[in-house]
Image (tube, rainbow, N blue to C red):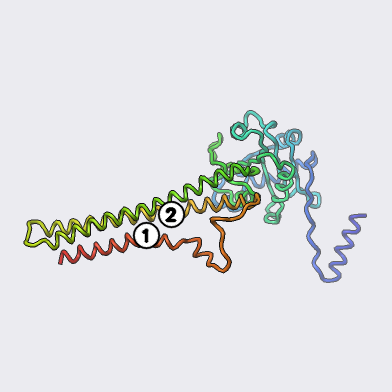
């Protein structure tokens, strides 16, 4: 009866000139009848040596046969398939650390580090149905069923599996670390773990302290540069106003101007590096504030008052001061040196 109703609906839509709505894939637990479709779909995505082109479209490097998937049916807590018109168009396999096999060296190591975990073993979507949220639906089903367990997924990172990386970012995963697996392929371990407010607050405190340290260090560099520059300009002025001609006076003056120019270049480079570090520290503080906002906090460092230029706030004008002063002094020393040669 349901089939008749569906056909009637399609005919009515065609008769009215409207386009029929595409059917929604159904998520269900995998069974023996799905294994052939799973193997066929995985085989189309599989490659033993992924290249850059494959990285843009996605790929699988684990070559499983039907017997492996049949074994996963019995031991994987989550073996989902997406079915449309009787055809398997996607699947996801995940299981807890209790089901990790001894030969899964990488997963054994991760479980030893994190304790109880849920491992996303494999996820695959038919390319004809990519970018329609199907993988997200499967991930959401698994994540909602395991709200308190850390969830990990090992994804090939050389070349970067771009669709997989985007998916994991979208689902709240963060890169845990990058390792070279026993098969010689580099992988990034993606981790989704319920944030601990206590840990976030401690890390936020550390990040703010590092930010303040970098800021103080930059101003200390500029302060020291002032002292050195004033001393060199004073020495230059005293020698230049010395009455009478002294041997090698001209060489001394050129030496001081050259030393002043080198000092300006050196402090310019260190302050450019310092402002880059300062920006990186601020980015980390902002990322931690994002997590604290999710936990019920408010923005402090990255808050943007209404009516202000967002881009101007993100790039503080003080960095131009920190970099610009030694550059200007360097040009002054260059002019002094050129004048001394003329």
Q: Which mark is residue 332?
A: none
Q: Against 11, is 70 above or below? A: above
* In this rendering, position of residue 70 left or right of residue 220: right
Q: Is residue 318 left or right of residue 28?
A: left
Q: Which mark is residue 323?
A: 1
Q: Position of residue 42 (x, y in %)?
A: 68, 44
Against 229, is 16 above or below? below
Q: Residue at x 34, y 55 (%)?
A: 222
In the image, farthest residue toward the top: 102
Please tell me how crowded label 2 is: few (under 14), some (14-19), or many (20+) other residues with Cα within 10 Å: some
Left-right relation of 239 to 92: left
Give the residue at mark 2.
276
Picture coordinates of residue 211 (x, y %)?
A: 47, 50
Question: What residue appears at the point 60 percent right and 31 percent down from the top-left corner?
Answer: 112
Q: Secondary structure at mark 1?
A: helix
Q: Is residue 121 visible?
A: no
Q: Residue at x 72, y 37 (%)?
A: 69
Drawn side of residue 319 relative to residue 101, left or right: left
- Residue 53 on image: x %, y %: 56, 52
**SS class of the residue under badge 2?**
helix
Give residue 182's position: percent from left, percent from top. 55, 34
Screen quadrant of the C terminus: bottom left
Question: Can the viewer see residue 117 in this picture?
Answer: yes
User: Residue 324's image quarter?
Assistant: bottom left
């Amino acid at each position: 009866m349901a089939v008749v109703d569906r056909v009637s609906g399609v005919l009515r839509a065609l008769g009215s000139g409207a386009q029929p709505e595409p059917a929604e894939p159904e998520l269900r637990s995998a069974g023996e009848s799905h294994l052939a479709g799973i193997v066929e779909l995985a085989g189309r995505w599989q490659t033993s040596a992924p290249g850059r082109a494959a990285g843009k479209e996605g790929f699988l490097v684990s070559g499983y046969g039907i017997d492996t998937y049949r074994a996963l049916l019995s031991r994987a807590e989550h073996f989902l398939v997406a079915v449309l018109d009787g055809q398997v168009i996607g699947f996801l396999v995940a299981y807890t650390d209790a089901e990790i096999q001894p030969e899964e060296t990488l997963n054994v190591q991760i479980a030893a580090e994190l304790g109880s975990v849920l491992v996303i073993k494999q996820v695959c979507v038919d390319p004809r149905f990519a970018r329609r949220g199907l993988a997200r639906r499967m991930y959401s089903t698994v994540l909602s069923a395991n709200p308190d367990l850390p969830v990990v997924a090992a994804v090939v990172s050389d070349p970067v599996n771009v669709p997989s990386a985007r998916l994991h970012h979208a689902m709240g995963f963060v890169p845990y670390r990058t390792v070279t697996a026993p098969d010689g392929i580099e992988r990034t371990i993606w981790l989704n773990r319920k944030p601990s407010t206590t840990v976030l607050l401690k890390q936020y405190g550390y990040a703010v302290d590092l930010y303040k340290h970098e800021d103080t260090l930059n101003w200390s560099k500029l302060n020291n540069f002032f002292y050195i520059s004033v001393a060199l300009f004073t020495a230059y002025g005293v020698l230049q106003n010395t009455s009478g001609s002294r041997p090698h006076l001209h060489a001394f003056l050129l030496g001081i101007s050259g030393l002043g120019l080198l000092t300006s270049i050196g402090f310019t480079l260190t302050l450019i590096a310092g402002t880059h570090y300062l920006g990186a520290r601020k980015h980390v503080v902002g990322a931690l504030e994002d997590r604290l906002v999710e936990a019920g906090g408010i923005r402090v460092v990255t808050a943007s008052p209404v009516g202000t230029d967002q881009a101007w706030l993100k790039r503080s004008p003080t960095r131009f001061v920190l970099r610009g002063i030694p550059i200007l002094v360097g040009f002054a020393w260059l002019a002094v040196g050129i004048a001394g040669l003329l």
